[in-house]
Amino acid sequence: MENTDSNLPAGRLIGLDLFRIFAVLVIFFFHTGHIGCSYGLLRGFIGQGAIFMTAFFMLSGFALYHTNSAVKLAEPRSMRKFYTKRFISVVPCYWVVAIAYTAYSVVHAGGNLLDSLVLAPIEALGLQSVFCSVFNMSHNGGTWFVSCILLCYAVFPILQLLIKEFAMRYRIILYLVLTAVLLYSPIVVSVLNLDNIYSNPFFRICEFALGAVLCSIWQTIKSLRWYNKYIASYWAVLAETVMLVGGVSVAQLLHIPSVNYMLYSWIGIPCFTLMLLSLCGLKFAPVNGSRFLRYCVDSSYVFFFAQFFTWPICSAIFKPTGGTAEVSTLIKVPVAVVVCCLITVTIHEAIEKPVTKKLKSLLLK
């Protein structure tokens, strides 16, 4: 869910931007469960909004491979620049939010100061995802994805080199192997009642790699007639969205375990794959060059962090009326959107943008 480079190549894929925003919104609506929101016929789909973290990791791998297609990251100078840019785009903002939330947790939410101090070095290095049992401690239930994406970045130069060396048939084989691992592993977890793998970095790296491989395949097929006729179409995107929403909703009716979100990869991965392929081939002329769209994309990373503070604030706002349970979803959602957007803009403008600009001038000379 991290912010990709603002300086994307000339072939910026607007479809990826729209996919990112769609995923951000579904995750946001999923998190409104913290204030008791309900969505009627869409409750099954929204209730499994966590599956869109798979979409984010696939999107990140896809976008990063596209952005760096012409860059040889195996060269030391290019690799150093790559890692520096990734650090700047992800870590400083994460540190600020983690410190702020930890302080809030200790002062107002009964958090344990000693536990926070013990975990601090691990969290600062972005290693918390390798300790699956810390998921419910402090901010780690939300920042685990930062830890996973940093590990994805660490392996990306090697991954890119391997993919570029592979012939098309081996890329397809790699895609199928990664998919098989991701589809079968949640079944093992469910049948044997093992620890949840939702925040496990190995499986998130597999999703990230899946996106990178998919991008390499797309770059090969994007000029083919059948792709442009059948895959890169608005009707295809509509059909894929209906398949995704309907598939998740039906799975809910069949009582597929809802706490094991990775089980829904059987629906999510095929749909996300098709959606990425379709959206990349469309131009979206009405929003091409839109400053508002660019701002939404650039601030999407912060938007996720802003939700840490949105739910306590919304709960405080609704408390005089009897609490969130007494307020309609039609009121709670707009209020939550406004609160989250205000926090996002504040952090993005006051912290993320100036810090990013300063670090780029110091570290990317």
Image (cartoon, rainbow, N blue to C red):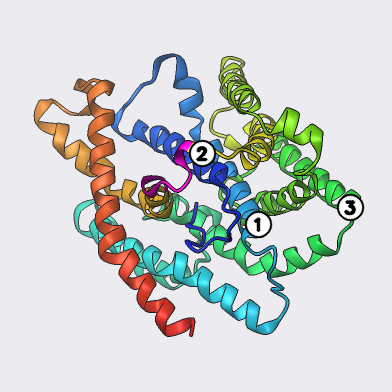
Residue closest to the eye, 122 or 354: 354
Residue identified by numbered label 2: 285
- Callouts 2 and 3 close, C-beta under 8 Å: no
In terms of depth relative to the viewer, which is nearer, 92 or 134?
A: 92
Which element is circle 3 on? helix
Left or right of 265 on screen, residue 149 = left
Can the viewer see residue 241?
yes
Q: Give the magenta part as a residue range.
A: 286-293
- Residue 39 image position (x, y, % from top left): 39, 20
Q: Are marks 3 and 1 in contact (CB under 8 Å)?
A: no
Picture quadrant where residue 249 is located: top right
Magenta: main secondary structure: helix
Residue at numbered disc 1: 66
**Around disc 3, counting alpha carbons within 10 Å, would you say few (fewer than 14), some (14 to 19), or many (20 or more)?**
few
Residue beneath label 3, please?
A: 170
The alpha-carbon separation of the residues under discs 1 and 2 comes to 20 Å
Q: For the residue marked with disc 1, what is the amino acid?
A: His
The local secondary structure at tag 1 comes to helix
The answer to whether 284 appears left or right of 322 in the picture is right
Q: Residue shown at 28%/37% (left/top)? A: 337
